[in-house]
Image (cartoon, grey):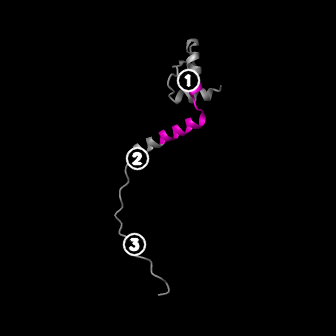
Amino acid sequence: MSITTLWRARSSKLEGFPTPVIVQGAVFWRKADLDQLEDALLKFKGRGVFERNREAERKLKRLRAAKPAAISAKPPRAPQRDLFD
């Protein structure tokens, strides 16, 4: 199991994922939590699902932060005349 996979699983807010102990930036889990960690990792669906969910969250955040565009009140264009009339 790579460090990146553990980070993705931890960041995906899996139900039942044990809280790690962080000491000076290093991430550890208690021995008592290893079974719970293994069960949570088995529920983790992988990088593809994680990345899709992450991108969807980013899009929602951008949409909520975006101001609605002002509606342009330009008059409709006249149809283009035929050159051979």
Would you say the magenta stretch is mainly helix, strand or loop?
helix
Q: How far apart are marks 1 and 3 (CA)?
A: 60 Å
Give percent across and percent down for residue 58.
48, 40
Q: Does the magenta stretch include residue 23?
A: no
Q: Earlier in the sequence, mark 3 or mark 2?
A: 2
The residue indicated by pointer 1 is 40
Marks 3 and 2 in Cβ contact (< 8 Å): no
Residue at image location 57% in from the left, 29% down from the top: 44
Task: Name the amino acid type tagged 3.
Answer: Arg
Give percent across and percent down for residue 53.
52, 37
In-image side of 74 versus 81 (left or right)? left
Give percent across and percent down for residue 9.
56, 28
Q: Give the range drawn in magenta.
A: 40-58
Residue at image location 58% in from the left, 25% down from the top: 41
Residue pushed farthest top? 32
The residue indicated by pointer 2 is 66
Task: Name the amino acid type tagged 1.
Answer: Ala
The residue indicated by pointer 3 is 77
Q: How crowded is mark 1: few (under 14 residues within 10 Å), some or many (20 or more)?
A: some
